[in-house]
Each structure stands twice: as C-alpha cells, then as structure tokens.
Amino acid sequence: MTDRLPSVTIVRRIKAAPAKVWAAITQPELMMQWWGPDAGPTLSVVADVRPGGRFSVVFRLLNGDEHNPTGIYQEVVPEKTLVFTWDLPGTPERESLVTFRLEPFDGGTVLTLTHEHLPDEEARTSHEEGWNGLLDKLPVFLGDCE
Amino acid sequence: MDRTFSALADPTRRGLLLRLKEEPGLSVSELARPFSLKLPGMMKHLDVLSDAGLITRTKTGRTVSVNLSVGPMREAMEWLKRYERFWTVSMDRLVALVEEDGEQ
C-alpha cells in the first residue's frame, strides 16, 4: 500500500503526440495560451526548463485577482517527465510539487498531472505512512459540521 | 497545514478521528479500547491530533472527553479543491490547444 500525503491527480488522453504536448508545457509562448484556471489572461511566463532552472507564471483571473506561482525545475526528461516545485505566495502552505508525465498512447499521449503537498522536513522524516482513505471521508466530516 | 497533514498521515490517528465522528465526546479510555492501545501510546496520538487542532479535550471531574474539531481539516480540503479546480481547467485548455489543428 502506498500511503501518500494529499495530492491532486488528473489524467488526460490527448490526441496529439508527446512532442507536441511537451512543447505546450515547456515553451513560454505556448504556455501563455493555456496556463490558468479560468478564461482570464496569462500575463507572463518564465520557464528555464532544466534542473535548477526557474519557473514563474503570472495569470489574472476573470475576477481581476492576479497570482504568481513560482518554482524550480527538479526533473526534466523531454517528452516524458517534467517536475517542478510550486510556491504560491499568499497561501498558507509551504512548497508543493507538480509532476507532468507523458506516455505515448495510440498515436496520442496520456498525460498524468500530479500536484502534491509536501510536508516539512520533520513531517517527512517522521511519517512514512500516509493518508489513504481519509480523503474520501473528509466531505462527510465537513458536511456534518456545517 | 503541515501539522494537519502529518497528523493525518497515520492509520491509527485516522481511525481515532473516524471513531470520534461516530461517537463524539468519548472518554480517552473508551476511545483506546478498540485500538488495543496502551494509555501512553494513546495519549501520544491524542497529543499529535490536539497539536494539529484536529481534536479538543475537555476534562470533567476525572474523565477527559474528546471531540473532533473541523477547522484544520477544512483547510486541507480547500487546498485539494483549489488545485483540483486549477488543474482541471488548465488541462482542458492545454488539451484544446494541442488538439486544435488535429495534427498528431
């Protein structure tokens, strides 16, 4: 059993080759065209795509709020794996980690995106065990107490 | 939030929280019974949960009753919801972009 800290995972089958998907997630001029959680504009992208290189995106939401997640690329395997840290100023959590995995599939690509919360060093060393099971029940907890 | 996550990263503690959800206000010894835990071990788990703000303990005479406290879990839930929304929409847009011209 793999117990983990909480994470968000999204899997998509895409009708485009891994090379094309890779370009869209690593080339700033392409990142400008999709990066952001609503139809608001992406204002700037820095993507120095090599281990240790910097990542920084500024996007504006439709409600006018601007956000600037930043991070450092950790792992870069062209057309396969892209891993970077994620730091979003103004949020309570510490760093988290974003991973894109690309696999060729039937002429297209299966893209798996994972966004993991990272524990601090203390939590990391003292808790190998994870988190399984409770997440499903959280809404129940919350629903009961509202 | 790190404390919440690390407090939840243990099956016994998750079991304790689920039990408390079913039976709020259990005493420490009632709570310990089905987990075959010795009292010191139990107190340790309760300390971790309490430090993370996931439970409250109330002393009445010689009995300590334990209750869930939902705030920090809500925070953890919001983290997940925020990023689920963020990436779902971003991925929709990414897919639309790379599939746009139908080339593979």
Image (cartoon, coloured by chain):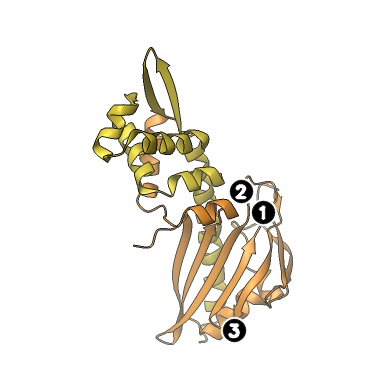
The earlier-in-sequence mark between 3 and 2 is 3
The chain that hosts pointer 3 is A
Report the Cα–Cα distance between label 3 and label 2: 30 Å
Specify the label residue B42 is tagged with.
none
Q: Nearer the viewer, mark 1 or mark 2?
A: 2
Work out whether disc 3 and disc 1 sit on a shared chain. Answer: yes
- Residue A63 appearing in the image: yes
Within 10 Å of disc 2 (Cα), the crowding (few <14, some 14-19, many 20+) is some
Q: Nearer the viewer, mark 3 or mark 2?
A: 2
The earlier-in-sequence mark between 1 and 2 is 1
Within 10 Å of disc 3 (Cα), the crowding (few <14, some 14-19, many 20+) is some
- The amino acid pointed to by label 2 is Glu
Label 1: state its secondary structure.
Answer: loop
- Mark 1 lies on residue: A88
Work out whether disc 3 and disc 2 sit on a shared chain. Answer: yes
The chain that hosts pointer 1 is A
> Which chain is tinted orange?
A
Contact? badges 1 and 2 (CB < 8 Å): yes
- The amino acid pointed to by label 3 is Pro
Work out whether residue B87 or residue A85 is closer to the camera in this orientation and state it. Answer: A85
- Residue B100 appearing in the image: no
> Residue at the spot x=50%, y=53% of the render?
A126
The chain that hosts pointer 2 is A
- Mark 3 lies on residue: A78
- Mark 2 lies on residue: A93
Image location (x, y in percent) of residue B81: 50, 49
Please name the color used to draw chain B: yellow
The residue lying furthest to the left in this view is B34
